[in-house]
Image (spheres, rainbow, N blue to C red):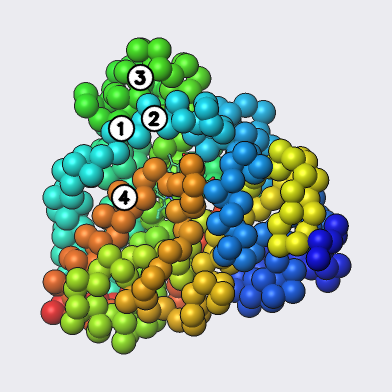
Amino acid sequence: MTTTSASPTWSAFDPFAPEQRADPYPALAALRDEAPCTHLDRYGVWLVSRYDDVAAVLKDWETFSSAQGAGLEPVATPEEGGVILSTDPPEHTRVRRAVARDFTPKAIGQLEPRVRELVGRALDVALAEGEIDWVGHVAQPVPTTVMAELMGYPDRHRDEYCRWASTIFDSMGCPAGGESSVLGEAIGGLFGLVGQIAADGEYVTGGWADRIVGAGERGELAQGEVVSLLGGILVAAMDTTVNMLGNLLHALATHPEQWRRLRERPDLAPGAVEESLRFESPVQPGFFRVTTTETTVAGVALPPGARVMVAFGSANRDPRQFPDPDRFLIDRTPNEHLAFGRGVHFCLGAPVARMIGRVVLEELVSSVAEIHPAGVARRKDNRMLRGFEHLPVALTPS
Ligand code: HEM
C-alpha cells in the first residue's frame, strides 16, 4: 500500500536532539518498525531508516540527487557543500576521477609503515602512563597527522584542521540561521588556510594537495573545485576517522570477551574494524539527498524536491539485515554495513580509514594485554558525527 503521509506519532521526532543523540538506537528501532519513511515536520525532511531502503536510495543517484549537498540545508554552490559530495554524474564522475586515481592500493600500502610507527609511538607513551585519554593520545593525533602528511600539508595546523572539520560536520545537521557565525568562521578558516597553503606552494611535492593543484593546472578541475577539494577531503577524512578509532576502542573496552577473542585471533582485526563501523557508525544520524521526481520509499509517496535523510546508523542496526544487530561481534559475517555509504558517492577514503583501524588493532594486540574503561567517557557534541571527546582507558602491557 502506498501512503502519502507518515505516522503522526513520529512526525515530531528529532534525530538531532541531544537526548536522542545520547542513545539513538531504541528510538531508531521503533521507527524502523512503525514508520520506516517518516516526515519530520520541524525540519521539513523525510527520514529513511531501514537498511534496504537506505541502500536503495544511495544507489539511485538519478532519483535521489546530491546536487544540493549532503547536509540538512541546501547549499548554494557545489563548492560550498564539498564539490565531490554535492554533485551528481557526470560532473561527479569527472571530479571524482581527478582525485580517485591517487587513492590506489599501492599508495595506501606505502602509507602503512608510517601509520604503524605513529601508532607504536603513541601506544608506548600510553603504556608508560597506564591510564590515558584514548582520544587525546591516539584516536585524534594518529589520523590527523596521517591525513596532513597524505595531503602534503604542514603538520603545525593539524589541530585546527580537525577542529574546523568537526564544526563543518556539525553544521550539516544545523537548521538555517543557526550558529552561522561559527560555521562561517570554520569554513573561512579551513578553506582560507588550505587556499593560502596552495598559493604559497607550502605543500609537499607528490602529496594529494600537489596532485589536486596539478589537476587544476591541467584544466581537469576549475579553480573553485580545486580549493573545495583541498579543504573538502580534509573535512571528510579527519573527524570521521578520529571517531571510528574512539568507537572501536570503546567497543573493545566494554566487550572484554571480544577483545580476548581478537587477542587469540589477530587475523580478525579487519573484521573488528568493520563491526565497529557498523555498531557505532561515525556518520550519524545521516546524510541527505533530494528527489528529482515523484517516487516511493517504504510504501510512502514522495514528491519531487523532497529532502530525504539516509540514516546510516539506523540501517546498520536493522535486524532485517543483521541478526542480533545490537551485539558487537568481531567475527560477524557477512557484514555489508553502510557506514561508508554506497553507490557513486561511496567513501573515497574507506581503504585509508580501514588500514588505519587495522594497524591500530594489530599494534594493540601485540603490546596490550587488557583494556579497561578508566572513568567517565564523554561523547562528542556533534549533530552529524558519533564519537568520543574524551575516552579514559587503562591499558596493561602484555
Ligand atoms: C571511518 C572513517 C570514515 C567514514 C565513516 C566516512 C564516511 C563517508 C560516507 C558515509 C560517505 C558517503 C557520502 C554520501 O553518500 O553522500 C563518504 C564520502 C567521502 N569520504 Fe569518507 N568516511 C571516512 C573516512 C574518509 C577518509 C579517511 C577520507 C579521505 C582520505 C574520506 C573521503 C571521502 C570523500 C572524498 C567522500 C566523497 C566521495 C564522493 O562523493 O564521491 N573519508 N565518507
Q: Which residue is mark 1?
A: 101
Residue 47 in percent (x, y) is at 70, 58
Q: Is residue 273 above or below residue 384?
A: below
Tell me the element at label 4: helix
Disc nearer the start of the sequence (2/4): 2
Q: Quadrant of the C terminus?
A: bottom left
Disc nearer the start of the sequence (1/3): 1
Asked whether mark 1 lies closer than 8 Å to ligand 1, one says no
Disc nearer the start of the sequence (3/4): 3
Instruction: Count residues near mark 3 (Cα–Cα under 10 Å), then give few for <14, some for 14-19, many for 20+.
Output: some
Distance Cα–Cα, label 3 vs label 4: 22 Å
User: Residue 351 got which mark?
Assistant: 4
Of residues 38 and 160, the one drawn nearer to the viewer in this rendering: 38
Q: Is residue 262 above or below residue 241?
A: below
Instruction: Count residues near mark 4 (Cα–Cα under 10 Å), then give few for <14, some for 14-19, many for 20+.
Output: some
Distance Cα–Cα, label 1 vs label 4: 13 Å
Tell me the element at label 1: loop
User: Residue 138 got which mark?
Assistant: none
Distance Cα–Cα, label 1 vs label 3: 11 Å
Residue 257 in percent (x, y) is at 31, 87
Residue 80 in percent (x, y) is at 58, 30
Marks 3 and 4 in Cβ contact (< 8 Å): no
